[in-house]
């Protein structure tokens, strides 16, 4: 439809003259500085909707080349004003600054402006059905003040106007005082930031339904790990086969997921095929927020399809679609294929690769680009259900109980992050900087954990990675820390591979642990793991185990491949054969080092480095006894993320105003017990560990209280974490865990460190037993490691175990 003739229509004549007004104000973008954190979009959605959903913002971030770089796209108030030209209702006008505005009362929702906008920056609001676009917040754009990197800049040709904002991009002071307009939004105290329902999908019957989230569940378990632990305990019958249809696979969010609270994530909860115990595996990126935007606090998947399928969740519309054409495809190909099939590149996808289909015990779930729920074999559980992928798109708003208080708490969190030296280090080099730190302290695994140092560690650290790989920073959704580094292999055999930063665990276990120092080769091996869908941590440990057995003559090398440390070709071969299950060796190693050692025999169990079946992380504990206790008591097997006492043992941080000696055993139980409780409590939010390096307990409490309306006392996270820790212990005991498995592998107990500052030290059986009994006492468990009835009663843990002491 053509616009009215301006010579005959006085209103049209007015709008024509407005189109010719000079453009004095606009927002300039700089994609070199953009990290893809989407904080600008969160600020925009808050401004317009009183809550959060990046899809409801009036700008967008385009992620290019597997998130190699990010491009902010925003209305540039273009001189041609196509939206004004095609509008049949004269709903558009320019103000004195040249900013194009929309009169909602005039707009008829025809959508012509949407079609003709060259940048796609005019949209129809899904609620009002009226056209909406950026109005630069009438000269005070919130996206600019919220951006943590200065990628958005407010330009005003009147240099005296908005001068402070122009001079201080990336600051949050102005944004912190903003109070959102919540009119028309279901974001009040009744709901807060919860969506108040789960989505239950039964793949056997190919049905789905919504399940209400009870107030009791929110009050007692908060979210994330808490929800997952309670539901797993209640939904599974004792002895459930982890790879059987009766196991459940849950994707859980927290009450702060999808909001502007810094560094929030999602988690997968299930029964692990690797350990046959409780499993929670965490991931960053954009997938978890999209679940909230679709209207759910979590997804619960049960049953098994009789053919490959993928799950398509589009708000309340849930479809179970055929995925036979995706069978055998890698995680990245699946991601691209589903987005193309759905016609929307902004859809968020979690998928498995061939390893998950082939039920490798440590298969991962790829959650969008470069973000994985890696540990414990959740990908195998997904594969056992014939579920290739989960695709999600949501348009709902994540609300807040008290928007003003929440924005103030976010600003406080940002101030704490800005003041933290640890966070500065994370921004500069991510976890790659820990490679040299671990090497200097004798904690870096070398040759299947035989040693604690690697003379070529700097080739794998942030120094080597910056030289050979990195091109820029990247961030998870809503996170100002931007610890990830995107880049590409630019020289050598693997030239052209786009890669995320090699985080510490992968660099250490796939590099130093295998005696491989070429960071480009390690990037290739880790990328191969991500594509095929196997945990690079467990895979690095399994390959190290196989290489040591090969060098000792216990394991015969495959034809044309020599199993020895430093052999990149052998590492690549093992990754592929494990994932594809195309050899007897691959099938054996796919079970993990514990089960593989039982099959191989010949004392191979003596060099199988695991706890409860899960391969050890890249922190050899012989030089830090508290770390040893943390690893052997973690609820999902060998894990460094349930407590990290190394910061106190060798990092110089005081515990209760005292220094903790790295080799001391007295007091380590209380330290580990306290750290585990607090970590589990925060995992209900679902926080990233890196955010907790800077954000205080008090601030997390303020964020939760403002978001949900729940009264938060100082001890909430510690007490909730202790309750969860006892619940997961009950689950593990019920599923057959022998408390005698709370022990370190033989290598850490019987073999002394051959190098490093603690050369000659090991954690003796006597030291291990002392710390374990002290730990049981701290927890209120019996000497056998079983929770006492009095402890469960004190914590309010509901259970039905007949053997509780």
Image (spheres, rainbow, N blue to C red):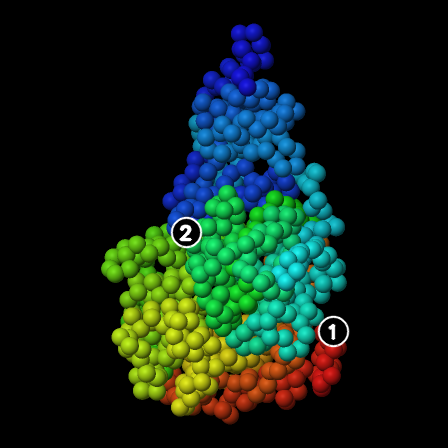
Give the vertical position of 805 relative to 73 (above or below). below
Indicate the quadrant where residue 181 lies. top right
The local crowd at label 2, few if under 14, some if 14 to 19, many if 20 or more residues have their Cα within 10 Å, is some
Task: Give the label on residue 798, or none.
Answer: 1
Q: Nearer the viewer, residue 79 or 799?
A: 799
Indicate the quadrant where residue 720 lies. bottom right
Task: Indicate the quadrant containing the C terminus: top left, top right, bottom left or bottom right.
Answer: bottom right
Residue 150 in view here: no
The residue that appears at 51% across and 29% down in the rendered structure is 115
Q: Nearer the viewer, mark 2 or mark 1?
A: 2
* The residue positioned farthest toward the left in the image shown: 492
Q: Give the mark, 2 or 1, whose residue is nearer the N terminus.
A: 2
x, y (%) of residue 420? 48, 59
Task: Indicate the quadrant containing the N terminus: top left, top right, bottom left or bottom right.
Answer: top right
Q: Are marks 2 and 1 in contact (CB under 8 Å)?
A: no
Give the vertical position of 743 relative to 505 (above or below). below
Q: Nearer the viewer, residue 234 or 673?
A: 234
x, y (%) of residue 619? 43, 75
Q: Nearer the viewer, residue 186 or 205?
A: 205
x, y (%) of residue 294? 62, 49
The local crowd at label 1, few if under 14, some if 14 to 19, many if 20 or more residues have their Cα within 10 Å, is few
**Disc 2 to disc 1, C-alpha distance:** 45 Å
The residue that appears at 63% across and 62% down in the rendered structure is 204
**Please, what secondary structure does the residue beneath circle 1 have?**
loop
Residue 422 horizontal side relative to residue 188, left or right: left
The residue that appears at 32% across and 83% down in the rendered structure is 556
Residue indicated by mark 2: 66
Give the vertical position of 136 relative to 42 (above or below). above
The residue that appears at 50% across and 57% down in the rendered structure is 324
């Amino acid at each position: 439809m053509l616009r009215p003739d301006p010579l005959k229509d006085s209103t049209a004549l007015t709008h024509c003259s407005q189109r010719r007004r000079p453009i004095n104000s606009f927002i300039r973008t700089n994609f070199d500085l953009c990290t893809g954190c989407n904080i600008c979009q969160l600020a925009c959605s808050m401004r317009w909707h009183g809550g959060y959903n990046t899809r409801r913002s009036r700008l967008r971030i385009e992620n290019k080349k597997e998130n190699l770089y990010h491009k902010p796209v925003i209305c540039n108030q273009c001189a041609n004003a196509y939206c004004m030209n095609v509008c049949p209702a004269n709903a558009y006008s320019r103000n004195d600054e040249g900013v194009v505005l929309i009169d909602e009362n005039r707009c008829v929702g025809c959508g012509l402006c949407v079609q003709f906008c060259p940048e796609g920056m005019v949209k129809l609001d899904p609620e009002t059905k009226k056209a909406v676009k950026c109005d630069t917040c009438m000269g005070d754009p919130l996206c600019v003040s919220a951006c943590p990197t200065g990628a958005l800049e407010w330009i005003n040709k009147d240099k005296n106007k908005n001068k402070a904002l122009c001079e201080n991009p990336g600051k949050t002071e102005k944004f912190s005082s903003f109070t959102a307009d919540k009119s028309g939004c279901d974001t009040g105290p009744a709901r807060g930031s919860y969506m108040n329902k789960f989505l239950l999908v039964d793949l056997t019957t190919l049905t789905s339904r919504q399940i209400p989230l009870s107030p009791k569940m929110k009050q007692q378990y908060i979210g994330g790990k808490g929800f997952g632990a309670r539901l797993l305990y209640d939904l599974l019958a004792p002895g459930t086969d982890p790879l059987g249809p009766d196991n459940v696979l849950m994707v859980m969010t927290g009450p702060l997921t999808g909001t502007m609270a810094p560094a929030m994530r999602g988690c997968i909860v299930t029964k692990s095929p690797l350990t046959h115990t409780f499993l929670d595996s965490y991931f960053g990126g954009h997938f978890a927020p999209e679940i909230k935007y679709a209207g759910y606090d979590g997804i619960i998947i049960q049953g098994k399809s009789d053919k490959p399928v993928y799950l398509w969740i589009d708000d309340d519309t849930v479809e179970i679609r055929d995925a036979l054409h995706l069978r055998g495809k890698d995680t990245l190909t699946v991601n691209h294929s589903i987005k193309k099939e759905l016609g929307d590149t902004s859809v968020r996808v979690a998928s498995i690769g061939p390893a998950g289909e082939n039920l490798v015990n440590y298969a991962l779930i790829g959650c969008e680009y470069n973000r994985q729920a890696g540990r414990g074999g959740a990908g195998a559980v997904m594969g056992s259900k014939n579920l290739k992928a989960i695709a999600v798109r949501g348009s709902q708003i994540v609300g807040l109980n008290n928007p003003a208080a929440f924005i103030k708490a976010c600003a406080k969190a940002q101030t704490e992050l800005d003041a933290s030296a640890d966070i500065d280090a994370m921004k500069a080099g991510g976890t790659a900087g820990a490679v040299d730190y671990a090497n200097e302290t004798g904690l870096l695994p070398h040759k299947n954990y035989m040693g604690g140092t690697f003379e070529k560690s700097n080739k794998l650290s942030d120094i080597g990675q910056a030289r050979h790989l990195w091109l820029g920073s990247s961030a998870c959704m809503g996170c100002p820390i931007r610890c990830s580094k995107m880049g590409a292999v630019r020289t050598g055999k693997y030239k052209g591979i786009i890669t995320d930063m090699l985080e510490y665990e992968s660099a250490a276990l796939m590099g130093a642990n295998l005696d491989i120092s070429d960071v480009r080769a390690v990037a290739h091996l880790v990328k191969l793991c991500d594509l095929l869908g196997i945990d690079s941590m467990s895979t690095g440990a399994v390959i190290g185990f196989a290489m040591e057995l090969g060098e000792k003559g216990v394991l015969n090398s495959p034809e044309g491949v020599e199993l020895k440390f430093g052999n990149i070709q052998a590492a690549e071969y093992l990754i592929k054969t494990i994932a594809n299950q195309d050899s007897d060796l691959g099938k054996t190693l796919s079970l993990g080092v514990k089960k593989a050692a039982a099959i191989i025999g010949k004392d191979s169990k003596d060099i199988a480095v695991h706890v409860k079946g899960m391969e050890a992380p890249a922190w050899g504990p012989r030089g830090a006894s508290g770390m040893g206790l943390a690893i052997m008591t973690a609820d999902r097997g060998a894990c460094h993320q349930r407590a990290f006492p190394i910061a106190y043992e060798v990092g110089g941080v005081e515990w209760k105003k005292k220094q903790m000696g790295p080799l001391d055993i007295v007091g380590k139980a209380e330290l580990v017990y306290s750290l585990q409780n607090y970590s589990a409590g925060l995992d209900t939010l679902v926080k990233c560990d890196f955010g907790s390096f800077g954000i205080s307990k008090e601030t997390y409490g303020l964020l939760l209280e403002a978001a949900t309306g729940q009264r938060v006392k100082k001890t909430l996270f510690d007490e909730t974490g202790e309750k969860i820790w006892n619940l997961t212990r009950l689950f593990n005991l019920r599923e057959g865990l022998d408390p005698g498995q709370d022990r370190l592998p033989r290598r850490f107990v019987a073999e002394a460190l051959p190098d490093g500052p603690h050369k000659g030290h090991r954690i003796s059986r006597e030291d291990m037993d002392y710390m374990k009994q002290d730990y049981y006492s701290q927890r209120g468990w019996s000497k056998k490691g079983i929770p006492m009835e009095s402890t469960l009663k004190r914590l309010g843990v509901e259970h039905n175990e007949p053997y509780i002491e």
